[in-house]
Image (cartoon, rainbow, N blue to C red):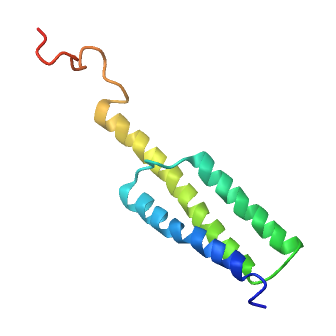
């Protein structure tokens, strides 16, 4: 039984090893730097299709690893949405909602311009 899905399980363990680190970073920093919601959704859908394949074609213990990874990616998606809202609020509280400085507040490109 274990021989049947050992390599698939290894693949899922390797992919799944990154998610707890990503979740921890998202939780503690409240930032989405370097993340893409589109990418997270594509990975989430990939795990959904993997689960469906296991259910309809080769039901075995590896299904549990797909489910674990799906839950972890789902948590990361929820944190992405939370962090996005947090970043928007912080941007508004810091500069009153303006995300770019107006021309009077920009620094001159010349170091000693008069």
Instruction: Note whether 65 is above or below 47 in the view shown.
Output: below
Q: Single out the residue that lies furthest toward the bottom.
A: 1
Residue sitting at the far top: 114
> Residue, x 78% and y 62% (percent of image)?
49
Q: Is residue 46 left or right of residue 29?
A: right
**Residue 61, x across and y down, in percent:** 74, 84
Which quadrant of the figure has residue 1?
A: bottom right
Quadrant assignment for the C terminus: top left
| Number of dots carrying numbers | 0
Which residue is at 64% across, 77% downward? 10
- Is residue 88 placed above or below 114 in the rendered structure? below
Which quadrant holds residue 100? Answer: top left
Q: Who's the residue at 68% across and 78% down the image?
A: 9
Q: Is residue 18 above or below residue 114?
A: below
Task: State the image coordinates of residue 71 (x, y, percent, origin top left).
Answer: 62, 68
x then y, percent, for residue 66:
69, 72
Q: Is residue 86 above or below residue 44?
A: above
Residue at point 41%, 44% (across, down)? 87
Percent across and percent down for residue 57 are 89, 73
Q: Is there any visible trace of residue 98 in the rendered image? A: no
Is any atom of residue 6 visible in this view? yes
């Amino acid at each position: 039984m274990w021989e049947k899905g050992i390599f698939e399980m290894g693949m899922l363990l390797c992919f799944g090893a990154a998610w707890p680190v990503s979740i921890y970073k998202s939780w503690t920093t409240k930032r989405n730097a370097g993340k893409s919601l589109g990418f997270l959704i594509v990975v989430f859908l990939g795990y959904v299709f993997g689960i469906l394949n296991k259910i309809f074609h080769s039901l075995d213990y590896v299904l549990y690893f797909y489910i674990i990874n799906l839950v972890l990616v789902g948590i990361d998606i929820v944190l992405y949405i939370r962090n996005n809202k947090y970043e928007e609020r912080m941007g508004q509280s810091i500069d009153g909602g303006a995300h770019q400085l107006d021309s009077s507040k920009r620094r001159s490109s010349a170091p000693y311009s008069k």
